Image (cartoon, rainbow, N blue to C red):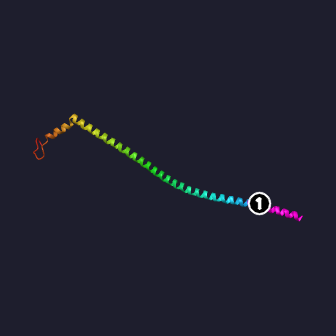
Amino acid sequence: KVQNRWSSVLASLEVQKKLKLELEERQLLASKRSSELDEKEEELLVRRAELDADLAEVSKIEAERDELFRQEAELESAVATARRRVRELELGRKEQQERDAERERTGHGRRSWTMNSFRSPPGSPPQGPV
Protein backbone atom coordinates (compact mmCIF):
# COMPACT_ATOMS: atom_id res chain seq x y z
CA LYS A 1 0.00 0.00 0.00
CA VAL A 2 2.71 2.49 0.92
CA GLN A 3 4.62 1.27 -2.11
CA ASN A 4 1.63 2.09 -4.34
CA ARG A 5 1.27 5.45 -2.73
CA TRP A 6 4.94 6.16 -3.18
CA SER A 7 4.76 5.13 -6.85
CA SER A 8 1.75 7.36 -7.28
CA VAL A 9 3.57 10.28 -5.63
CA LEU A 10 6.63 9.71 -7.86
CA ALA A 11 4.45 9.53 -10.97
CA SER A 12 2.66 12.68 -9.91
CA LEU A 13 6.01 14.35 -9.31
CA GLU A 14 7.15 13.37 -12.81
CA VAL A 15 3.95 14.80 -14.31
CA GLN A 16 4.45 17.98 -12.31
CA LYS A 17 8.05 18.31 -13.62
CA LYS A 18 6.87 17.90 -17.22
CA LEU A 19 4.08 20.40 -16.63
CA LYS A 20 6.56 22.82 -15.04
CA LEU A 21 8.91 22.54 -18.04
CA GLU A 22 6.02 23.03 -20.45
CA LEU A 23 4.79 26.09 -18.53
CA GLU A 24 8.31 27.56 -18.39
CA GLU A 25 8.64 27.07 -22.15
CA ARG A 26 5.26 28.68 -22.74
CA GLN A 27 6.22 31.56 -20.43
CA LEU A 28 9.48 32.04 -22.38
CA LEU A 29 7.56 32.07 -25.69
CA ALA A 30 4.98 34.47 -24.27
CA SER A 31 7.71 36.76 -22.93
CA LYS A 32 9.45 36.71 -26.33
CA ARG A 33 6.15 37.42 -28.08
CA SER A 34 5.44 40.24 -25.63
CA SER A 35 8.83 41.82 -26.39
CA GLU A 36 8.17 41.53 -30.13
CA LEU A 37 4.77 43.17 -29.66
CA ASP A 38 6.31 45.96 -27.58
CA GLU A 39 8.81 46.64 -30.37
CA LYS A 40 6.03 46.55 -32.95
CA GLU A 41 3.95 48.95 -30.85
CA GLU A 42 6.92 51.33 -30.61
CA GLU A 43 7.36 51.17 -34.40
CA LEU A 44 3.66 51.86 -34.87
CA LEU A 45 3.78 54.82 -32.48
CA VAL A 46 6.71 56.28 -34.41
CA ARG A 47 4.87 55.68 -37.69
CA ARG A 48 1.73 57.28 -36.27
CA ALA A 49 3.70 60.36 -35.23
CA GLU A 50 5.12 60.57 -38.77
CA LEU A 51 1.64 60.23 -40.26
CA ASP A 52 0.26 62.86 -37.87
CA ALA A 53 3.03 65.22 -39.00
CA ASP A 54 2.22 64.42 -42.65
CA LEU A 55 -1.47 65.03 -41.97
CA ALA A 56 -0.71 68.38 -40.37
CA GLU A 57 1.37 69.33 -43.42
CA VAL A 58 -1.43 68.23 -45.77
CA SER A 59 -3.96 70.26 -43.77
CA LYS A 60 -1.70 73.31 -43.95
CA ILE A 61 -1.22 72.89 -47.71
CA GLU A 62 -4.97 72.45 -48.21
CA ALA A 63 -5.62 75.65 -46.25
CA GLU A 64 -3.05 77.48 -48.40
CA ARG A 65 -4.66 76.03 -51.54
CA ASP A 66 -8.10 77.15 -50.37
CA GLU A 67 -6.72 80.65 -49.73
CA LEU A 68 -5.16 80.70 -53.20
CA PHE A 69 -8.46 79.63 -54.77
CA ARG A 70 -10.22 82.41 -52.85
CA GLN A 71 -7.64 84.94 -54.02
CA GLU A 72 -7.93 83.63 -57.58
CA ALA A 73 -11.70 84.13 -57.48
CA GLU A 74 -11.23 87.67 -56.13
CA LEU A 75 -8.69 88.45 -58.85
CA GLU A 76 -10.92 87.02 -61.58
CA SER A 77 -13.76 89.16 -60.30
CA ALA A 78 -11.52 92.24 -60.21
CA VAL A 79 -10.29 91.52 -63.75
CA ALA A 80 -13.87 91.08 -64.99
CA THR A 81 -14.84 94.39 -63.33
CA ALA A 82 -11.81 96.14 -64.84
CA ARG A 83 -12.56 94.71 -68.30
CA ARG A 84 -16.17 95.83 -68.01
CA ARG A 85 -14.98 99.33 -67.03
CA VAL A 86 -12.53 99.39 -69.96
CA ARG A 87 -15.34 98.39 -72.35
CA GLU A 88 -17.55 101.14 -70.90
CA LEU A 89 -14.78 103.72 -71.27
CA GLU A 90 -13.96 102.58 -74.80
CA LEU A 91 -17.65 102.71 -75.72
CA GLY A 92 -17.94 106.19 -74.21
CA ARG A 93 -14.83 107.35 -76.09
CA LYS A 94 -16.16 105.86 -79.33
CA GLU A 95 -19.53 107.54 -78.82
CA GLN A 96 -17.79 110.85 -78.08
CA GLN A 97 -15.65 110.48 -81.21
CA GLU A 98 -18.76 109.74 -83.25
CA ARG A 99 -20.51 112.81 -81.82
CA ASP A 100 -17.43 114.93 -82.54
CA ALA A 101 -17.25 113.54 -86.09
CA GLU A 102 -20.97 114.17 -86.57
CA ARG A 103 -20.56 117.78 -85.42
CA GLU A 104 -17.67 118.23 -87.83
CA ARG A 105 -19.72 116.67 -90.62
CA THR A 106 -22.82 118.76 -89.98
CA GLY A 107 -20.82 121.93 -89.61
CA HIS A 108 -21.42 122.54 -85.93
CA GLY A 109 -17.72 122.56 -85.44
CA ARG A 110 -17.20 125.02 -88.37
CA ARG A 111 -19.92 127.37 -87.24
CA SER A 112 -18.37 127.51 -83.86
CA TRP A 113 -15.04 128.30 -85.52
CA THR A 114 -16.71 130.75 -87.89
CA MET A 115 -18.43 132.59 -85.05
CA ASN A 116 -15.18 132.77 -83.16
CA SER A 117 -13.50 134.29 -86.20
CA PHE A 118 -15.97 137.25 -86.09
CA ARG A 119 -15.08 138.07 -82.52
CA SER A 120 -12.54 140.74 -81.83
CA PRO A 121 -9.17 139.63 -80.60
CA PRO A 122 -8.59 140.36 -76.94
CA GLY A 123 -7.61 143.97 -76.29
CA SER A 124 -9.03 145.31 -79.59
CA PRO A 125 -12.09 147.55 -79.74
CA PRO A 126 -15.39 145.74 -80.22
CA GLN A 127 -16.83 145.71 -83.72
CA GLY A 128 -20.43 146.34 -84.53
CA PRO A 129 -23.17 147.44 -82.17
CA VAL A 130 -22.50 146.87 -78.55
Which residue sits at x=31%, y=42%? 89
Point out the image quarter for the N terminus: bottom right
Residue farthest to the bottom, as pictured: 2
Q: In this view, does 114 lie to the left or right of 15?
A: left
Point out the image quarter for the C terminus: top left
Q: Is the magenta stretch mostly helix, strand or loop?
A: helix
Residue farthest to the right, as pictured: 1
Which residue sits at x=66%, y=59%? 32
Of residue 123 and residue 102, the one placed in the foreground of this image is 102
Tell whether position 4 is magenta: yes
Q: What residue type is labelled 1?
A: Lys
Q: Where is residue 90 in the image (x, y as percent from the top left)?
A: 31, 41
Q: In this view, does 4 lie to the left or right of 84?
A: right
Total of numbered circles in the picture? 1
Tell whether position 8 is magenta: yes
| Residue designated by label 1 | 18
Q: Quadrant of residue 23?
A: bottom right
Q: Position of residue 123 (x, y in %)?
A: 11, 47
Of residue 50 and residue 56, the one placed in the foreground of this image is 50
Q: Give the range drawn in magenta.
A: 1-21
Which residue sits at x=84%, y=62%? 8
Residue farthest to the top, as pictured: 106
Of residue 120 and residue 97, the one placed in the foreground of this image is 97
